[in-house]
Image (tube, rainbow, N blue to C red):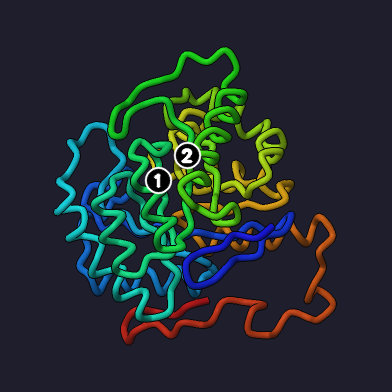
Amino acid sequence: MRLELRGGALSLERGRPRLMGIVNASPDSFSDRQGSRGLDELVEQSHRLVAEGADIIDVGGESGRTDRPPVTEAEEGRRIVPLIERLVADGIAVSVDTWRAGPARAALGAGAAMVNDVSGLADPTVAELCAEHGAGLVITHTRAAPKVKGFGNYEDVVADVIGLLRDRARAARDVGVAEHSILLDPGLDLAKTPAESVQVLRRLPELAKLGRPLLLAISRKDFIGAVTGRHPADRGAGTLAAIEPSLALPGAVLRVHDVAATADFVAVRRALLGAVDGLDAALVAELRREAFIRPAAGHGHTV
């Protein structure tokens, strides 16, 4: 599979999902204990995620939290544009997490390669903008309005996901978005109970029949919290467990906070499933044990 973005493309293959690193330019992310960061800190975080294995950085200027009111489009643009400009200048592929045409237009003007629309194209202008700029487009399943907590009344949640994504993808193609620029997101936790999100993950092969790679925005989600009883920032292990079904897909992108841990998980699972690249060589000596840290004077000895 191939995902065409503005300025380049990503090849996708079974068992090797691409990674999208999450960088929040908003001060109220649902899972961020630190809160607001300055521009330089956000740029540094983005570079670190790329070094850890992220293929694309997803920049968001408005939290998806439903207990916070929407910010103005001008404020969202103010948060994201300087960061996108810096990252694009550094050669980093950037996706913008927005559902509104104004911020999408501003982000694409700053050089963003893709728009990650979590609303299911609530504003069709977003697709038109992606077509105009030759940008990638994420189309997400949801039956709730943006920033509204609600649940669908599904007879079959997976059938509903397939139907809506097929319809919205057709609408995007009709306004000029290229087939190979479309990435489909089943919308875990969006208008879905934890049980419904789990059901979607169990039935990913059915979604793969749509013929496009899937974006799984899986990191630290509520369904993981429902299973583990843990707060968002403590859902790392649960996130890795939830990644497992994606390895069977012909093409997938994983949207995650912890890029290094995800990359390690995927690498080890690939090895266990038969991809043994590099395992014939002995482990380099530097990796066989932790480096010795000399204690400061007067603080005893490390053993």
Instruction: Quarter of the image for the N terminus: give it.
Output: bottom right
Q: State the residue in front, 122 or 177.
A: 177
Relative placement, left or right, of 32 versus 78 is right
**What amino acid is labelled 1 in the image?**
Asp
Q: Is residue 247 above or below residue 287?
A: above
Label 2 crowding class (10 Å Cα cut-off): few <14, some 14-19, many 20+? many
CB atoms of marks 1 and 2 within 8 Å: yes
Q: Position of residue 158 (x, y in %)?
A: 61, 26
Question: At 54% across and 51% down in the image, what residue appears?
Answer: 182
Q: What residue would you read off at disc 2?
A: 140
Q: Quadrant of residue 77?
A: bottom left
Residue 18 image-quadrant placement: bottom right
Residue 287 image offset from top left, x and y in percent: 64, 79
Observer-nearest residue: 25 or 298? 25
Residue 260 position within the rendered picture, expressed as x and y whole percent measured from the top left: 53, 64
Q: Label 1: how many residues lie within 10 Å, few (<14), some (14-19) or many (20+)?
A: many
Considering depth in this image, is 261 or 141 the residue closer to the camera?
141
Mark carried by residue 265: none
- Judge left or right: residue 139 versus residue 295: right
Q: 23 or 206, which lies in front?
A: 206
Q: Identify residue type, mark 2.
A: Thr
Q: Could you say which disc has been placed on residue 117 in the image?
A: 1
